[in-house]
Structure formats: structure tokens, C-alpha cells
Image (tube, rainbow, N blue to C red):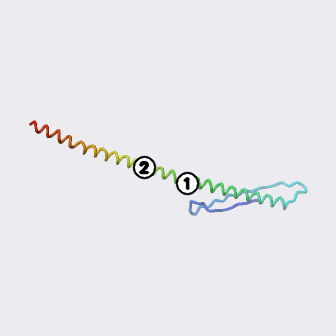
Amino acid sequence: MTAGRTFNHPHEQYSNLRPDVTLRATLEDGEDPDKAAKWLQAKAEGLVEDHKNGLLKSIEELYQLSEINSSVASLEDELKRATSRLENLRKQRDGLLQLPEKAEAGNEVGDHL
């Protein structure tokens, strides 16, 4: 017995997934082939459905991980830029705060001349 299912990839356009499975059985004399076929078909369909659900869960987890990694990288870049800007502003501020001291020191030198 063969069972398969085609479904759309949840995050990619024009991309399909198709899990399938084939099960075979060897029957002993006296075993009911119809009963065995129904059991194999149900088993095959269950396996395919379980695999589909596992694929979708894994794909979603990978997608979420990718989104988180992208956000982390973006935030790290923003943090680097903000830290650099903060350091530059602090240097500018510190330079401006030291100006009056330099000006006073210059006046003192000028006063002595």
C-alpha cells in the first residue's frame, strides 16, 4: 500500500512538500487480504500524516529561529551604531566642558604678559 500527501510549504511560494510511504505485507495462508490491505492503508496514511505534521513543526521552528537570529543581528548592529554615536557625543561633550578651563588658563597666561 502507498500513501502520500502534497501540501504547500508554509513560508515559500511555489514550493510543495510530498511525503509518501509504501508498505508491503506477506500474508500467511488463511489471512484476509482485504483486512490486511485496509490495515496497511490506514497505517500508511497515519505515517504520512505524522510525517507531514513533523515536517510542518520543524519548518516552523526553523523559520522562527531564522527570524529571531535576523532580529538579534539587526539589534546588535543598531547597538554597535548607538554605542559608537554615544562615545562620539561623550567625547564632544567632554571637549566642550574642558573649553572654559582652557580659556581661563589662556587668560591667566595673557594677564601675565
Give the residue furthest to the right.
Answer: 30
Foreground residue among 36 and 113 = 113
Q: Position of residue 28 (x, y in %)?
A: 88, 54
Dot 1: few (<14), some (14–19), or many (≥20) neighbours within 10 Å? Answer: few
User: Under tag 2, what secondary structure?
Assistant: helix
Instruction: Locate residue 53 relative to residue 88 in the image: left or right.
Output: right
Mark 1 and mark 2: span between their CA atoms? 20 Å
For the N terminus, which image quadrant? Answer: bottom right
Say which residue appears at 80% left-offset and 61% top-offset.
38
Amino acid type of disc 2? Asp
Say which residue appears at 76% left-offset and 57% top-offset.
43
Dot 2: few (<14), some (14–19), or many (≥20) neighbours within 10 Å? Answer: few
Sequence-first disc among 1 and 2: 1
Instruction: Locate residue 79 relative to residue 49 in the image: left or right.
Output: left
Q: Position of residue 4 (x, y in %)?
A: 70, 60
Q: Which residue is mark 2?
A: 77
Residue 29, quarter of the rendered image:
bottom right
Foreground residue among 48 and 96 = 96
Image height of 70 relative to 94, above or below: below
Q: Position of residue 93 (x, y in %)?
A: 28, 46
* Residue 50 circle label: none
Q: Report the number of discs.
A: 2
Amino acid type of disc 1? Gln
Image height of 93 relative to 112, above or below: below
Residue 104, quarter of the rendered image:
top left
Say which residue appears at 69% left-offset and 56% top-offset.
50
For the C terminus, which image quadrant? Answer: top left
Foreground residue among 24 and 43 = 43
Foreground residue among 39 and 109 = 109
Q: Which residue is mark 1?
A: 64
